[in-house]
Amino acid sequence: RHVEVRFDPGALKEYVTGFRKRKQQRRVKAQKSAARKEREARIDARKERRQAIKEMISEAGLDSSDSEDESGSGGDGEGSGGGREELNYENEEAQVTVTVEPMRQDESDE
């Protein structure tokens, strides 16, 4: 049996010069992967923040679906037209009247 080995200068050149190319490809791939992971982490953080805010709103009883059904259930106040609402709270020591009205556009710009 005779084994013949052929020398291919093109293959040798590709192998030797390919180190830099392959290393660069690994770097690019790692950068893309890191960017993707960072983006996913930001998205997850935003989702968690939104969920926490929703939970805080629902725990405080300010959930929009609940407030429409229970309008004025927090006290024995009277709701008046135009989006304005007055609530009265009383106990042995004090009486508190809370007036809630929508913000006007010119006040929110300041």
Image (cartoon, rainbow, N blue to C red):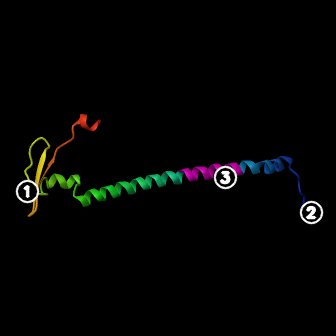
In the depicted view, which residue is nearer to us: 53 or 8?
53
Residue 17 is situated, as x and y percent measured from the top left of the image, at 79, 47
Q: Is residue 99 magenta?
A: no
Residue 33 is situated, as x and y percent measured from the top left of the image, at 57, 53
In the depicted view, which residue is nearer to us: 77 or 48?
77
Characterize the magenta stretch by its predominant secondary structure.
helix
Identify the amino acid type marked 3: Arg
Q: Quadrant of the N terminus?
A: bottom right
Q: Which residue is mark 1?
A: 76
Real-space CA distance between mark 3 and mark 1, rounded to the nearest whole angstrom: 69 Å
Looking at marks 2 and 3 on the same chain, the residue that comes earlier in the sequence is marked by: 2
- Badge 2 element: loop
Q: Quadrant of the C terminus?
A: top left
- Residue 51 sits in quarter: bottom left
Foreground: disc 2 or disc 1:
1
- Badge 1 element: loop
Residue 36 is situated, as x and y percent measured from the top left of the image, at 53, 51
Looking at marks 2 and 1 on the same chain, the residue that comes earlier in the sequence is marked by: 2
- Residue 96 sits in quarter: bottom left
Q: Farthest residue in the top direction?
A: 106
Identify the amino acid type marked 1: Asp
Q: Residue at x 29, y 58 (%)?
A: 56
Q: Which residue is mark 3?
A: 26
Q: Which residue is mark 2?
A: 2
Q: Residue at x 14, y 57 (%)?
A: 74
Residue 34 is situated, as x and y percent measured from the top left of the image, at 57, 53
Foreground: disc 2 or disc 3:
3
Q: Are marks 2 and 3 in contact (CB under 8 Å)?
A: no
Per the rendering, the mark at residue 87 is none
- Please give the range of residues in magenta: 23-35
